[in-house]
Image (cartoon, rainbow, N blue to C red):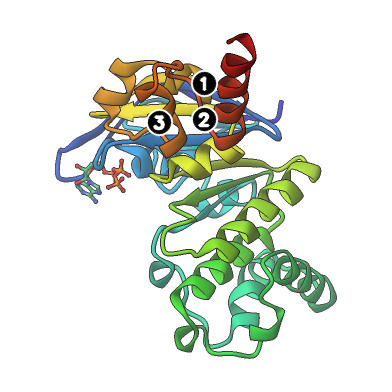
């Protein structure tokens, strides 16, 4: 069965610090999930469990039918690709082309297939003009797209994005939204860690809120944002439209401008 499953998972770092406690979740093929929550809640630690970079110290993580404990990270990462929060932790090749080609070559694809993977991934991220560039000489935001393309080129079943919109302007954020649409068509699941609630409410139906090592809520964006105790405990912020809606007493689950306008116009009609 194609899914990621965390079953009673704890993760303790080698220094003894317990970063995740009793995590349980299932993410199905093609699902889009946003993981939100306070700094240090354990979000990055948790997603690294999903692609085998971290192995649970208690419980089990399954990717499809593979228990990650029994496989190398490279074997798991073929199915679940993780894009690092900081591109400089990921990039090490001297050209953008070689950086994107690295994993397909690692998996012993022919150069013809490698080129196809590189071109496709570069087109989705709008970075074809940079293929010959040295990745260390291009802007940070483009470097971030290079790292996403490098993981996309593996053709994973799931893509994990860690803070993808950080530092991106409107055009960059639109390229990311377009990426999500392309991945949806290809039935590739997407798991995003983000502090950008506008990005969450515009692109994600399912939201997992974390606080202090735990998953404290798992539901639709509407369910999560309408609950004050979840917002407070996970220290997330409602969207600007959500704040205005709540201040006006129009409810706590308004997510975007269209919903605010809809609620306001229905009130005006009634009067
Ligand atoms: N290698 C490590 N060794 C020990 N502790 C670590 C290590 N990496 C992270 N931690 C600790 O684990 C906790 C969870 O970190 P993690 O990066 O998973 O949080 P996060 O929710 O992703 O935070 P942020 O939003 O700030 O990125 C933090 O207290 C962090 O200091």
The residue that disc 3 covers is 244
From the viewer's perspective, tell me whether residue 109 is left or right of residue 169: right
Give the structural element (helix, strand or loop) at label 2.
Answer: loop
Label 1: element kind:
helix
The circle drawn on residue 196 is: none
Q: Is residue 96 left or right of residue 219?
A: right
Q: Nearer the viewer, residue 75 or 41?
A: 41
Residue 131 lies in quadrant: bottom right
Examine the rendering and report whether any part of residue 244 can be seen.
yes
The total number of labels drawn is 3
Q: What is the distance, in whole Å, between disc 1 and disc 3 at their CAs?
A: 15 Å
Is there CB contact under 8 Å for labels 1 and 2?
A: yes
State the residue in front, 205 or 190: 205
Q: Earlier in the sequence, mark 3 or mark 2?
A: 3
Nearest-to-viewer mark from 1 and 2? 2
The vertical placement of 101 against 170, above or below, is below
The C terminus appears in which quarter of the rendering?
Answer: top right
Circle 1 residue: 222
Name the residue: 46% across, 34% down. 241
The Cα–Cα distance between marks 1 and 2, rounded to whole angstroms, is 7 Å
Check disc 3 and report its element: helix, strand or loop: helix
| Residue located 71% across and 25% down the image | 1
Q: Which residue position holds label 2?
A: 255
Q: CA distance from mark 3 to mark 2?
A: 10 Å
């Amino acid at each position: 069965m194609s899914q990621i499953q965390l079953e009673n998972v704890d993760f303790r770092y080698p220094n003894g610090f317990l970063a995740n406690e009793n995590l349980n979740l299932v993410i199905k093929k093609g699902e889009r999930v946003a993981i939100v929550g306070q700094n240090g809640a354990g979000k990055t630690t948790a997603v690294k469990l999903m692609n085998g970079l971290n192995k649970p110290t208690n419980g089990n993580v399954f990717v499809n039918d593979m228990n990650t404990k029994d496989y190398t990270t490279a074997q798991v990462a073929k199915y679940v690709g993780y894009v690092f929060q900081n591109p400089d932790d990921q990039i090490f090749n001297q050209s953008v082309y070689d950086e994107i080609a690295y994993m397909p070559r690692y998996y012993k694809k022919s150069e013809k297939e490698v080129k196809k993977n590189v071109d496709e991934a570069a087109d989705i991220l709008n970075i074809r003009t940079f293929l010959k560039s040295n990745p260390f000489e291009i802007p940070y935001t483009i470097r971030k797209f290079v790292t996403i393309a490098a993981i996309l080129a593996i053709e994973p079943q799931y893509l994990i994005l860690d803070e993808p919109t950080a530092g991106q302007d409107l055009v960059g954020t639109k390229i990311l939204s377009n990426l999500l649409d392309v991945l949806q068509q290809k039935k590739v699941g997407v798991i995003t860690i983000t502090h950008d609630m506008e990005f969450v409410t515009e692109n994600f139906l399912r939201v997992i809120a974390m606080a202090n090592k735990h998953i404290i809520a798992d539901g639709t964006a509407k369910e999560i944002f309408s609950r004050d105790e979840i917002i407070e405990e996970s220290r997330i912020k409602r969207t600007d439209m959500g704040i205005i809606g709540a201040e006006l007493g129009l409810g706590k689950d308004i997510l975007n401008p269209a919903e605010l306008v809809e609620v306001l116009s229905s009130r005006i009609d009634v009067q």
